[in-house]
C-alpha cells in the first residue's frame, strides 16, 4: 500500500477509533526504539511471517530519517543459506536485552515456544509490543505480557494487514505535529512527494 492509498484510507476512517488506535500504537513503537539503542526485533508466528511489515518499516525508517525503525526480522525457519536480512532465527530472541524492542505480530496462535521466548525477552528488559487478533488463548497470553498492544478482533472494519500498513505509516511520521494552516499542507504535500519519489530499499 503506497502513501496515496494510506492517505485515502485515513480519510475513510476519519471519525473512527482506528486512526487514534494505530497512531497511539505507532507512537509507542517509535518511542521505544531510541537512537543508538538495541534496535527493533520483529517476529510472527510459525505460520505467519510479517515480512511485509518489515519492508514497510524499512521504507519508513529511510524516508523519516529514523534508522532505528528498521527492524530485524526474526524467522521461525531461518536458514544459514538465506540472505542476511532473512537469516535471523529465534535464537536472536534469547539475546534480547534492555534497550531493545520486540514487536510480535500474531494473526493466529503464537505457540508455547514463542511465548516462552517473548517472556524471557521481557524479563531481560526488552520492551514488548503485541499486534494481533486476540482470538487464540496464546494471543491473549501474549497481550497480558506486552507493554503495549493493538488488537484487531474478528468482525472489525479493518483486517490485520491493513492495520499494519497504518501502523508503519504512522511510525514514520514526525513525532512533533507540524503547524496548522498553509505550512502544514505544504509539509504534508512535501512528505507525500518524498514518499512517491524515494527509491525502494533492498528487496525482500
Image: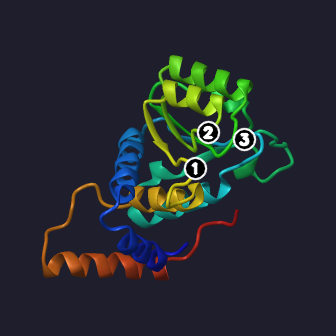
58 to 42, vertically: above or below: below
- In this orientation, which residue lies closer to the viewer: 93 or 157? 157
List x then y, in percent, for residue 115.
65, 26
53 to 144, vertically: above or below: below
- Label 1: state its secondary structure: loop
Which mark sits nearer the N-terminus, 1 or 2? 2
Which mark sits nearer the N-terminus, 3 or 1? 3
Q: Which residue is mark 2?
A: 135
- Label 3: state its secondary structure: loop
- Residue found 52% across the figure and 31% down from its top: 143
Q: Which residue is mark 3?
A: 88
- Left or right: residue 91 versus residue 164 is right
- Label 2: state its secondary structure: loop
User: As drawn, which residue projects farthest toward the front?
Assistant: 155
- Quick check: marks 2 and 3 in contact, CB under 8 Å? no
Front position among marks 2 and 3: 2
The numbered mark at residue 154 is 1
Q: CA distance from mark 3 to mark 1?
A: 31 Å
Amino acid at each position: 500500500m503506497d502513501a496515496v492509498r494510506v492517505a485515502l484510507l485515513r480519510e475513510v476512517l476519519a471519525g473512527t477509533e482506528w486512526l487514534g488506535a494505530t497512531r497511539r500504537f505507532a507512537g509507542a513503537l517509535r518511542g521505544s526504539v531510541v537512537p543508538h539503542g538495541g534496535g527493533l526485533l520483529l517476529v510472527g508466528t510459525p505460520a505467519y511471517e510479517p515480512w511485509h511489515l518489515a519492508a514497510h518499516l524499512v521504507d519508513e525508517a529511510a524516508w523519516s530519517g529514523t534508522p532505528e525503525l528498521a527492524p530485524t526480522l526474526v524467522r521461525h525457519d531461518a536458514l544459514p543459506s538465506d540472505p542476511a536480512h532473512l537469516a535471523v532465527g529465534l535464537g536472536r530472541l534469547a539475546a534480547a536485552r534492555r534497550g531493545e524492542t520486540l514487536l510480535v505480530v500474531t494473526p493466529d496462535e503464537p505457540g508455547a515456544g514463542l511465548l516462552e521466548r517473548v517472556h524471557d525477552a521481557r524479563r531481560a528488559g526488552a520492551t514488548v509490543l503485541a499486534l494481533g487478533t486476540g482470538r487464540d488463548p496464546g494471543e491473549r497470553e501474549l497481550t497480558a505480557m506486552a507493554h503495549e498492544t493493538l488488537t484487531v478482533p474478528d468482525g472489525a472494519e479493518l483486517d490485520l494487514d491493513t492495520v499494519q500498513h497504518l501502523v508503519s505509516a504512522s511510525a514514520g511520521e514526525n513525532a512533533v505535529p507540524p503547524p496548522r494552516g498553509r505550512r502544514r499542507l505544504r509539509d504534508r504535500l512535501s512528505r507525500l512527494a518524498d514518499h512517491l519519489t524515494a527509491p525502494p530499499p533492498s528487496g525482500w
